[in-house]
Structure formats: structure tokens, C-alpha cells
């Protein structure tokens, strides 16, 4: 009776998975998603966008793979950075973290509180900055709040990454990848609309029979939207 299942995939890059202490490989992540989809379960794919352990091409591979599952009906739940938080295992690697010193009246002494993990690859860090800038200019509102959908907002983060990639590396043609994100966005919005109409969760088999085919007639329209964003 399970229809949706959240999976802490985080990345499809083995170096990232090892760095953050995940005891799974990229191949095992893909296998888990394939099994879920094969048995009619819509997996929720949790992804960390920028980490200290990734590279530009490694992150692109992760997002390419994530979108391929989104187009099969999986949800993408993305956080833009690796957030440390006090007491988490990642704090055992203090050299990769940004710290904030907290010192308030009544405390026994100052406390260094871990914040985001730093991006060690200079090329990837520049791409992170560009991605954040593009995402902030995409709209004056929070997609997650307006659509009440973290997966929709997550796809806009991925689209911002591809647009930043296109700006930084013009020779790297990512127009196909951007089109695929647009297809996934249409799919998610159609699923959300159908969920509102039916007053509940949209079954996985309904997605395959009805909603996935419905994205195709809109493909030309979303291509024009992407073209404007690339100008």
C-alpha cells in the first residue's frame, strides 16, 4: 500500500557520498530508485546541490540523473547547500565549514556554531555564486510557497544551475538539459493540479497513463521560456 517513499539520495557522485558519510554508492542509489518505480512507488529524491566534495562535472552528472528520475514521476527535494548544524557528524571536518561565533549574555563562554560547508573547488564555487544569482532573479516570489511545492522549487534550482553553466561555459551546450527540466516542471505542475482536483495524492500509475503524455503538447512553449532566460 506504499505510494510514495522518501530516499536520502543526496548525490549520484561516490566522492560526495563518501565525504558526507553516506554508507551507499551511486549505483545503489540508482538501484533503489529503479526498484521503487518498478513497484509503483513514487520515490522522493533528496539532493544536496553544492558540497565541498563535488566538481562541476560531478554535480552536472548528479542533476542529469535526478532529472531523468523526475521525468519518470519521482519527486526531487533539493537543498542548495550542505548545512552542518551543531553536533552533526560533518562537524568532525571543521576545515570545510563556515563558523559563526555566538556570544550572548548568560552564556558560560562563546560558542563556535557550524554553518554551511564551504565549496573547495574554485570553479564550482564560482558556479554556486552564479546559480544563486540566477535563482534570485528568476522570480520575485518563493516558488515553494506559491506552489506549496518544494519539488517545483527544487527544479527551479536545477534550472538555475544549468543556466549558470551555460553562461560560464558557453561551449558546453546544455540546451537539452534545460528542456528536460522544463518538461519535468510541466509534469510536476500537472500532477499538482490533478492532486488539487482530486483532493488527494495522485497515484503513480495515473502519472504514467495520463500526466506524462500530457506534457508533450506544451514542450514548444517551455522551450521559448528557456530561450528568454538564456538571453
Image: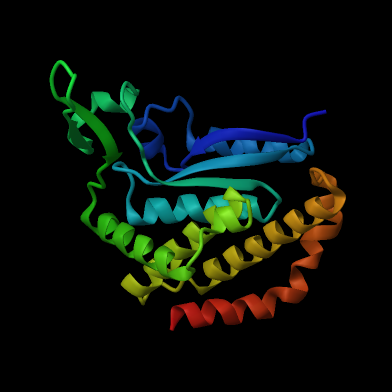
Colour scheme employed for the rendering of this structure: rainbow
Which image quarter is the N terminus in?
top right
In the figure, residue 84 lies in which quadrant? top left
The answer to whether residue 228 is seen in the rendering is yes
Q: Is residue 155 left or right of residue 84?
A: right
In the figure, residue 188 lies in which quadrant? bottom right
Please tell me whether residue 198 is drawn above or below residue 131 in the rendered image.
above
Q: Nearer the viewer, residue 67 or 159?
A: 159
- In the displayed image of the protein, which residue is found farthest to the front? 105
Q: Position of residue 171 (x, y in %)?
A: 36, 76
Q: Position of residue 225 (x, y in %)?
A: 57, 78
Q: Nearer the viewer, residue 60 or 126?
A: 126
- In the displayed image of the protein, which residue is found farthest to the left? 109
Q: Is residue 126 left or right of residue 31?
A: left
Which image quarter is the C terminus in?
bottom left
Q: What residue appears at the point 77 percent right and 60 percent down from the top-left corner?
A: 212
The answer to whether residue 169 is seen in the rendering is no
Q: What residue appears at the point 75 percent right and 60 percent down from the top-left corner?
A: 190
Q: What residue appears at the point 49 percent right and 58 percent down from the top-left corner?
A: 158
Q: Is residue 160 left or right of residue 75?
A: left
Q: Is residue 30 left or right of residue 48?
A: right
Please tell me whether residue 125 is drawn above or below residue 112 in the rendered image.
below
Please tell me whether residue 154 is drawn above or below residue 43 in the rendered image.
below
Q: Position of residue 143 (x, y in %)?
A: 55, 59
Amino acid at each position: 500500500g506504499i505510494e510514495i517513499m522518501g530516499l536520502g539520495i543526496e548525490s549520484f557522485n561516490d566522492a560526495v557520498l563518501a565525504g558526507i558519510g553516506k554508507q551507499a554508492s551511486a549505483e545503489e542509489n540508482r538501484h533503489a530508485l529503479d526498484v521503487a518505480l518498478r513497484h509503483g512507488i513514487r520515490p522522493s529524491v533528496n539532493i544536496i546541490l553544492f558540497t565541498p566534495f563535488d566538481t562541476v562535472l560531478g554535480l552536472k552528472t548528479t542533476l542529469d540523473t535526478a532529472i531523468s528520475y523526475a521525468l519518470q514521476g519521482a519527486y526531487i527535494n533539493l537543498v542548495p547547500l550542505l548545512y552542518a548544524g551543531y553536533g552533526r557528524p560533518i562537524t568532525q571536518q571543521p576545515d570545510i565549514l563556515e563558523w559563526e561565533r555566538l556570544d550572548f549574555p548568560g552564556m558560560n563562554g562563546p560558542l563556535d556554531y557550524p554553518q554551511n560547508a564551504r565549496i573547495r573547488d574554485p570553479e564550482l564555487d564560482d558556479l554556486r555564486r552564479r546559480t544563486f544569482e540566477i535563482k534570485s532573479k528568476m522570480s520575485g516570489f518563493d516558488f515553494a510557497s506559491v506552489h506549496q511545492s518544494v519539488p517545483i522549487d527544487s527544479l527551479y534550482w536545477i534550472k538555475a544551475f544549468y543556466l549558470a553553466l551555460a553562461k560560464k561555459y558557453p561551449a558546453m551546450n546544455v540546451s537539452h538539459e534545460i528542456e528536460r527540466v522544463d518538461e519535468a516542471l510541466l509534469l510536476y505542475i500537472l500532477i499538482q493540479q490533478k492532486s488539487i482536483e482530486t483532493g488527494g495524492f495522485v497515484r503513480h500509475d495515473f502519472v504514467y497513463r495520463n500526466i506524462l503524455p500530457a506534457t508533450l503538447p506544451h514542450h514548444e512553449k517551455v522551450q521559448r521560456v528557456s530561450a528568454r532566460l538564456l538571453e
